[in-house]
Each structure stands twice: as structure tokens, then as C-alpha cells.
Amino acid sequence: MKKQAYILALMVLSTFVSLTPPAKTLDMYWIDVEGGAATLIVAPSGESILIDSGNPGGRDSERIYTVASEVAGLKKIDHLITTHFHIDHFGGAGELAKRIPIVNIHDKGIPENLSEDVNFAKNIQPYRDIKAKRYTIKPDYELSLKAMPRGTAPLSLHCLGINQQFVATRKDADTNGDCGETTDKPVDTSDNANSSVFMINFGTFTLFNGGDLTWNTEKKLVCPVNLPGEVDVYQVNHHGLDQSNNPVLIQSLSPTVAIINNGTKKGCGPETFTSLRKTPSIQAIYQVHKNLREDGTTINTAPEKIANMEENCKANYIKLSVTPDGQQYTVSIPANSYKQVYQSKK
Ligand SMILES: [Zn+2]
């Protein structure tokens, strides 16, 4: 082929390729907010959902802003879901809203006060001040999302429970066989027990996000009926603290992958870790931080599955990317180039 003809053929080919853009993935980021929570979801439509917003003080809002704008290329956060009213979950929102617009806010309604937070009225003020459309989450609440582009699986964020109230069970629902040998822990009167529980479904892919739900409420979610059913990915409740992560919940979810948004000295508890390791379905556990406690209860996953190894870390994030058909997903830590592919359950 003559050189000009070859160049022409290349031009025609590249035009054709650029006219048929590849279908987009569903991307999620566990942003490092040092033992708080901030899970960013970017839909194939470009719509974005942030579940929790870390702590106040500038650090966490800066980190969320950086991942949202520089990594995910976002110009706004379409939806902010606040799972409950503890400062490590709502604290960064006010500052974040000054850097990038937050369009819609979904929560259970701001309480007047909170017994475990004497400074609640002051702490919540920046969150109250955000100019966004507000929505109240109830059991069975579903986020209203834009239609997905052609060629991608349907996406939904559905609330199974909040304020210790759950969706109704189907009349024909089977009783969960794992409920026999369960124990209770002291009643949790904090707002953790009131956390919202969201199921994120993308085709056959399913992720569980239960905020800081605690032991006895976790049991109510799966006993006598397993409301969530089996999932692919479990965002480990409450940073992996042992007040949460009732083994009956983990067994009932039967996840393939567990992701812990722990801090260097918060979460990633020994009881939780043992329960995760004992769950046969779990192929991998990921941590936002290496557990650096020196109390003899320190357990860690394999080093390549930890985003941040040092106390003074670079705030590396964990990324999860689901193929447009929802059938396969990759969990990666871009900072250390580790990645692993998993198949979604059917
Ligand atoms: Zn928390």
C-alpha cells in the first residue's frame, strides 16, 4: 500500500473507532478519610453518588475533592447520602460543598440533638447550610438516577433499612438457616444502630453499604429473613470495629470481597477479622490502612491489598470498577499497581 493510502485508511479507521465509544464502567472509590467514611460512586452515565463525607478540618474534604475532580473528572457531586449523624460520616460535607457543588442530599432527617455528641448543634451547622435539594431516606427508598447509556446494565441504589426499620419481607421468603447460633451484644443507643443500609446493584453485581450499623441491628437485617441476600462486595460495617460485623450478617451476605475503610488505629478489629477469614466465600480482604495498633490485637490482610502502609500516608484510595454488563469487577490500588479481577455472582 502506498503511504498516502495507508494514512487515509488509518484516518477512516480511527474515525470509525471514535464514533463508537466503548460502554463505560461503574467506578467506586474508597477515599482515605483516616477511619471515617467516604465512598464515591461514578455511574456509567457520569452521575455521581458520594456515600458519607469524612471528617471536618479540611483534610478529608480536600481528599474527596481531589479524587472527585482529578481522578474521576467530576464537576459536581449529584447525590450525597449520609448514612448517620456521626462526624466521621457527615463532617466533611460543608467544606466539600464550598469546593464542588453538591446537588442532592439524602439522609434520615437531621436530628435536633444527639446524646453522644454534646457539640452536635454546632457540628451539624455547616451540613445544614449546604444549599442542596433534600430528601428523606425511609426503608425501601430508591435513589432516582439518570437512565444508563446504551450497552450498560441497570444501576440502582436501594435502601433496605434505616433507623432500625426495615423493608417488609416477602410472604414467601425463606427463613435464614444461619440464625440459629447467634449472640447479642449490649444494646447500642448511638446513631450507629440507625445507619442506612444501601444495596448497590449494577446488573448482577451487588455491593452492601451499611454505614456503621452495629451487632444487634445487623442481626435484625438478616434474621429471621435474609433481606439483602448474597452480595459480591461487602463494605465492612463501621470501619471493621468489633461492635459491628456480627458473623451472622457476614455469613448471610456471603461476599466475595470485603473492603475495610479503617484508620491506622481505628477499626479492623480482631473479632471482625476472624469472622471475615472464617467466611468461605471471601476471596480477598482490602484495607484502606495498615492496622498499626500496638495492643497485640493487630491483624492485617496481605500487604498488596492495603492502600496505605504508613501513619503519615499519601491518602491512597481503593478503586473498584465493574464492567458495563455488571458481570465482572476489578479491585485495584492504583498507588501500588495491584489489581485483581473477580466474577459477579449470578
Ligand atoms: Zn464511622
Image (cartoon, rainbow, N blue to C red):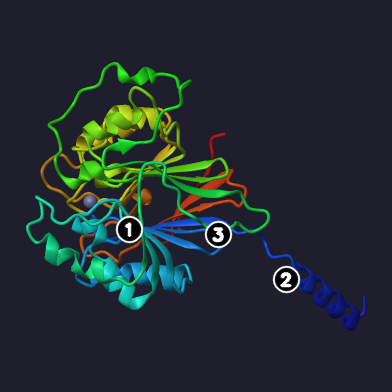
Q: What's the amino acid at mark 2?
A: Ser
Mark 2 element type = helix
Quarter assignment of residue 175: top left
Tag nearer the camera, 3 or 2: 3
Q: What's the amino acid at mark 3?
A: Lys
Q: Position of residue 6 (x, y in %)?
A: 87, 77
Answer yes or no: disc 2 within 8 Å of ligand 1. no
Q: Position of residue 265 (x, y in %)?
A: 17, 51
Tell me which residue sits at (10%, 43%) in the image: 295
Tell me which residue sits at (37%, 41%) in the image: 139
Instruction: From this view, report whether residue 60 is shown above or below residue 112.
Output: below
Q: Position of residue 212 (x, y in %)?
A: 25, 45
> Which labelled disc corresponds to residue 323?
none
Residue on which the image places disc 2: 18
Q: What's the amino acid at mark 1?
A: Ala
Given the current orientation, which residue lies at the most extreme right position?
A: 1
Mark 3 element type = loop
Instruction: Depth check: give the residue in front, 288 or 40.
Output: 40
